[in-house]
Image: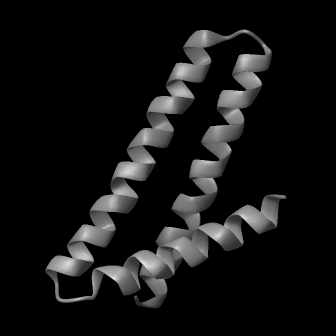
Amino acid sequence: MNTLQTLVHRQRAHLILAAGLGIEICMALRDRDGAQRHRAEMEGLIAARDAAIQQAEEEGACYFVEAGDVSRIQSEAQRAVS
């Protein structure tokens, strides 16, 4: 994974967390439509993350290495906001 890919994965991890917080806020406000919008955003980001891992594998990278790198980035993002 090169530097740009790492930055994109880091950004995506933080955006996924932000969407999750958006869901929680909307649920606390009883804003079902807002929560559904945040959920759709989160699902799109997760699909993009999974597609990036799949693309890397198709380009010859090891799936488990790529998925492990993304998992590490997700853990770092989670610790940063905890």
2 left or right of 10? left
Across and down, in percent, residue 56 comes to 26, 79
Q: Which of 73 and 41 is in front in this view?
A: 73
Give the residue displayed 71% in from the left and 20% down from the top: 26
What x and y, as percent, mark residue 63?
A: 29, 80
Total tally of numbered discs in the picture: 0
Q: Which of 29 and 3 is in front in this view?
A: 29
Q: In this view, does 66 lie to the left or right of 57?
A: right
The quadrant where residue 73 appears: bottom right
Q: Locate the C terminus by quadrant.
A: bottom right
Image height of 71 relative to 21, above or below: below
Q: Residue furthest right?
A: 82
Please state the horizontal and vertical placement of residue 70, each as a whole percent of the image. 49, 74
Point out residue 68 in the picture as x, y percentages from the top left corner.
Answer: 47, 80
Tell me the residue at 66%/70% (across/down). Answer: 75
Q: Which residue lies furthest to the front in this view?
A: 64
Q: In this view, does 46 lie above or below 78?
A: above
- Measuring 56% from the left and 12% from the top, which residue is drawn there? 33
Using the image, determine if residue 10 lies above or below residue 30: below
Q: Quadrant of residue 28?
A: top right
Q: In which quarter of the image is the N terminus?
A: bottom left
- Residue drawn where x is 48% and y is 70% of the image: 8
**Does residue 18 appear to the left or right of 6 in the view shown?**
right
How did the renderer colour the structure?
Answer: one colour
35 versus 44 height, above or below: above
